[in-house]
Amino acid sequence: MNTTPQPDPRDRPARLTVGVVGAGRVGPALAASLQLAGHRPVAVSAVSDASRRRAGQMLPDVPVVPPAEVLERSELVLLTVPDDALPELVAGLAETGAVRPGQLLVHTSGRYGAKVLDPALRAGALPLALHPAMTFTGTPVDVQRLAGCSFGVTAPDELRLAAEALVIEMGGEPEWIAEENRPLYHAALALGANHLVTLVAQSLELLRTAGVGAPDRMLGPLLGAALDNALRSGDAALTGPVARGDAGTVAAHVAELRRHAPGTVAGYLAMARATADRALAHGLLKPELAEPLLGVLAGPSDAAGGTGDTPGDTT
């Protein structure tokens, strides 16, 4: 057994003081990960009681100060605010002189690349866009989940190595995303992750309505296998009544959903149509079965308003 004392990460050279503007779920977790790599969180801004508690839990003993003071104290600043608030925040910090030349300014928005930081760049800052492709809980478990997490990285060419090094220090895997592709990249992640939560939550509710006592236990293995198969095989992993062309079964589904959970009908029909299109295009759905299936998916309400919906509501 090796008993040689390991060096303290804080003794490594070129460590940075780290500040966080916006103590939502993401910022404190990233700062805590950088702290494990030897960097030193020195300041965090937080407005709500929840964000203050989160900062206290994730970054104990780090003072809560206004955003301008975070920048004053920090060599590396994490801007972890909602996407829509980011451009105004950056412009405001640059206009007030809070940004210092040579300061690393990192935002974590999936939507934006490095250009949203142009006002800070003109003030001499070094702009980096590092978006972790992960959902966050706002608890210490997030730090563990960053291990192996992909980050969408966008930065000027001369800062590419610095950006990728920071991601690796947080335990992540850098994935370079071109500036013009950031919105598409973010849409892809939202389509897969955010909509998945909605679909699973609806499925849990329907199983409870059907009398299933432990719907989470029932869905866990099924969804785990479906996700694994989809990641491995793509469209070839499609199964179920839509891919098979079982129009009668799909019609029964729609009828039951209209009866017990009408709010889920639009989503079911939309996803079933998309599934049918992909199954047909990849030769999984036989063309002779596609026509009756698509007729069912058109839905009686679309044609005649039978449930009070207006035509086109489910497209």
Image (tube, rainbow, N blue to C red):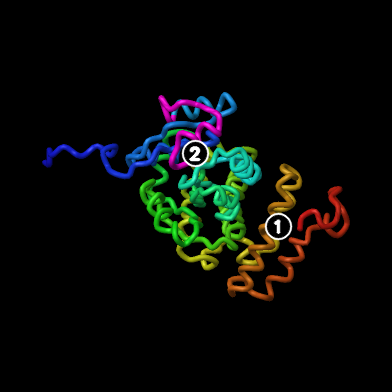
The residue identified by callout 1 is: 270
Coordinates of residue 70 in the picture (x, y in percent): 50, 33
Screen quadrant of the C terminus: bottom right
| Residue situated in front as seen by the camera: 274 or 9 | 9
Mark 1 crowd level (few <14, some 14–19, many ≥20, 10 Å Cα): some
| Residue situated in front as seen by the camera: 176 or 71 | 71
| Residue situated in front as seen by the camera: 239 or 81 | 81
Residue 307 vs residue 200: left or right?
right
The residue identified by callout 2 is: 27
Coordinates of residue 261 in the picture (x, y in percent): 72, 43
| Residue situated in front as seen by the camera: 38 or 193 | 38
| In the image, residue 284 above or below residue 8 | below
**Which badge, 2 or 1, is on the more N-terminal residue?**
2
| In the image, residue 35 above or below residue 50 | below
Q: At label 2, which amino acid type do we have? A: Gly
| Magenta segment boundaries in residue numbering | 58-78
Q: Residue at x 57, y 24 (%)?
A: 49
Q: Is residue 292 magenta?
A: no
Coordinates of residue 28 in the picture (x, y in percent): 47, 35
Checking the image for residue 167, the label placed there is none
Q: At label 1, which amino acid type do we have? A: Ala
Residue 310 vs residue 165: left or right?
right
Helix, strand or loop status at disc 2: helix
Q: How far, Cα to Cα, is label 2 from label 1?
A: 35 Å
| In the image, residue 171 above or below residue 269 | above
Q: Is there CB contact under 8 Å for labels 2 and 1?
A: no
Screen quadrant of the N terminus: top left
